[in-house]
Image (cartoon, rainbow, N blue to C red):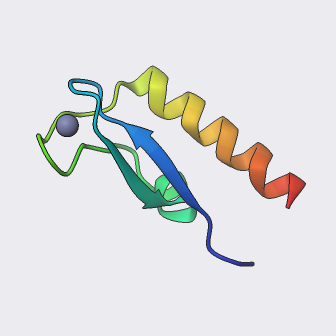
Amino acid sequence: MSAIDVELTCPEGNETFKLNAQEVLNRIIIKCPKCDCYLSEEELKEVKIAIRYMMRVH
Ligand SMILES: [Zn+2]
């Protein structure tokens, strides 16, 4: 399977950062590399659902 990057939006600012999709699925927490803000549990859950859907489609 080829690597897929997902773009995430920082919960505090408007900056975006990219992470490998598989890595996101393996994480229980994700934080912005710029300001160290954590993504909310709810948001991370939604991102993971989107990734799993994306991977099925590919
Ligand atoms: Zn940030």
Indicate the quadrant of ligand 1 in the picture.
top left
The residue sitting at the front extreme is 14
In the rendered view, does 16 fall on the left or right side of 23? left
Q: What residue occupies the far right of the structure in this picture? A: 57
Q: Position of residue 16 (x, y in %)?
A: 35, 42
Residue shown at 47% from the left, 21% from the top: 42
The spot of residue 43 in percent (x, y) is: 46, 25
Vertical placement of residue 28 versus 56, above or below: above
* Percent of width and height locating residue 39: 33, 31
Quarter of the N terminus within the rendering: bottom right
Vertical placement of 26 versus 30: above or below? below
Instruction: Pinpoint residue 50: horizontal percent, then vertical percent.
Output: 68, 38
Image quarter of residue 31 = top left
Q: Is residue 15 left or right of residue 53?
A: left
Please state which of residues 56 and 14 is positioned toward the viewer in this rendering. Answer: 14
Please state the total of marks drawn on the protein image: 0
**At 40% across and 26% down in the image, what residue appears?**
41
Q: Quadrant of the C terminus?
A: bottom right
Q: What residue sits 88% from the left and 53% below the top?
A: 57
Q: Is residue 9 left or right of residue 25?
A: left
- Residue most extreme to the left: 35
